[in-house]
Amino acid sequence: MTALCAVVAVALGLVVWGQLAPRGDAVPLSPGNAGPDGARAVTQILGRHGVDVHTAGTFEEAMAALGESSAATLLLYDRNGILDEPRLRDLAAAAGEVVVVTPRLETLTALGSGIRQAGVVPDDAPPLAPGCPLPDALAAGEVSGSQGFVYDGGVSCYRPAGSAAGLLAVSGDGQLTVLGSTVVLGNGQLDERGHAALALRTLGKSPDLVWYLPSLEDVAASGSGQTLDELAPEWVRFLGPWLLVVALAAIAWRGRRLGPLVFEPLPVVVKAVETAEGRARMYHDAHAVDQARDNLRAGILVRLAARLRPGPGASAGTVIEAAARLLGRPAADIRDLLNHHPGSESRLVAWAQELDNLEKEVNSR
């Protein structure tokens, strides 16, 4: 009994610990994200190689971490373009080296490195070779260009075929490194090709690494943005009155009376063949084989009864026997033909032709 209580207590403790243990986050390239698009693996590997990784969630935390070391490396992944030009310049001035992942045009312009966007890596591109003299790229070897962007300016590495821009670009002074792919740093493919080697050699040059992912707190800290009136061009203020004039003119045009409505009956004649073809198309579109079969059978019985004159109120069996006597054929053959159930549209067409032949044979006698 004591052993059972101990086992239950241990199991309960494990359940409580599992519920209270930190679960990380789901932010792309976050050191706390253990998913395929997270960066927990590369930050832990950097820590084992003597690199102290400082995670910053706001601009103030990033500046404080950079201020503790004059030669710290800054990794910046501003995927939503939150930071403005003054804050980007402050970060670049405080860091010894800046590594920017898939930056936007505004980010590159603010950093003033001469590196610019140059397109994307083709979806069917093979793994990219270094193709440049940078020691880090040569040591890492091939990397994947999946979902990557290419940049031109400075020294470009990992260039797709026929392109002068590369997945990795380093400024002339070596202070800015632009990496056009999150796959190289992500957990999902870190152990493939030269991803881990390139990540460690690019981010592990300094004993201090500030990992900064701008968040919504940085948006709030930047103050209120421009209003719609400030963003709109000057000519928009004349657009409202002009649209009002156009709307009034349209109301006057469409609202004028043209006189009372006159109702005139028009004769409409629909040919029987058009009705039959239209109904046949509907049966064909709906694959209504059984419904078409019933209509065809009822039609031929009515026409045979009118031709053979078996008498008022004659049943289908009476019509079949009259047709058999006229043609000199067994009644069972004609009954099997009329009671046949086609299983497909092609068989329905063939059966309809057989019914037509039967009707022609009766009419010819």
Image: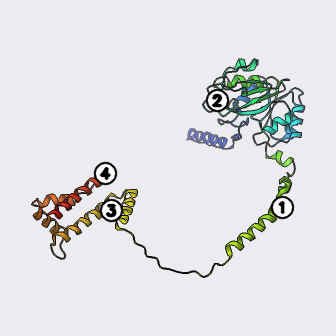
Q: Are marks 1 and 4 in contact (CB under 8 Å)?
A: no
**What residue is disc 4 on?**
346
The image quadrant that residue 303 belongs to is bottom left
Q: Amino acid at mark 1?
A: Phe
Task: Name which of mark 3 and mark 2 comes first in the sequence.
Answer: 2
Disc nearest the viewer among 3 and 1:
1
**What residue is disc 2 on?**
189
Cα distance between the residues tagged 1 and 4:
67 Å
Q: Give the structural element (helix, strand or loop) at label 2.
A: loop
Task: Name which of mark 3 and mark 1 comes first in the sequence.
Answer: 1
**What residue is disc 1 on?**
238
Crowding at dot 1, Cα within 10 Å, few <14 / some 14-19 / many 20+, comes out as few
Task: Name which of mark 1 and mark 4 comes first in the sequence.
Answer: 1
Which residue is found at the position 63% from the left and 25% from the top?
A: 127
Q: Are marks 3 and 2 in contact (CB under 8 Å)?
A: no
**What residue is disc 3 on?**
291
Q: Is residue 19 above or below residue 156?
A: below
Cα distance between the residues tagged 3 and 2:
59 Å
Q: Give the structural element (helix, strand or loop) at label 1.
A: helix
Which residue is found at the position 13% from the left and 65% from the top?
A: 321
Q: Amino acid at mark 2?
A: Gln
Q: Nearer the viewer, residue 232 or 257?
A: 257
Crowding at dot 4, Cα within 10 Å, few <14 / some 14-19 / many 20+, comes out as few
Task: Name which of mark 1 and mark 2 comes first in the sequence.
Answer: 2
Q: Are marks 2 and 4 in contact (CB under 8 Å)?
A: no
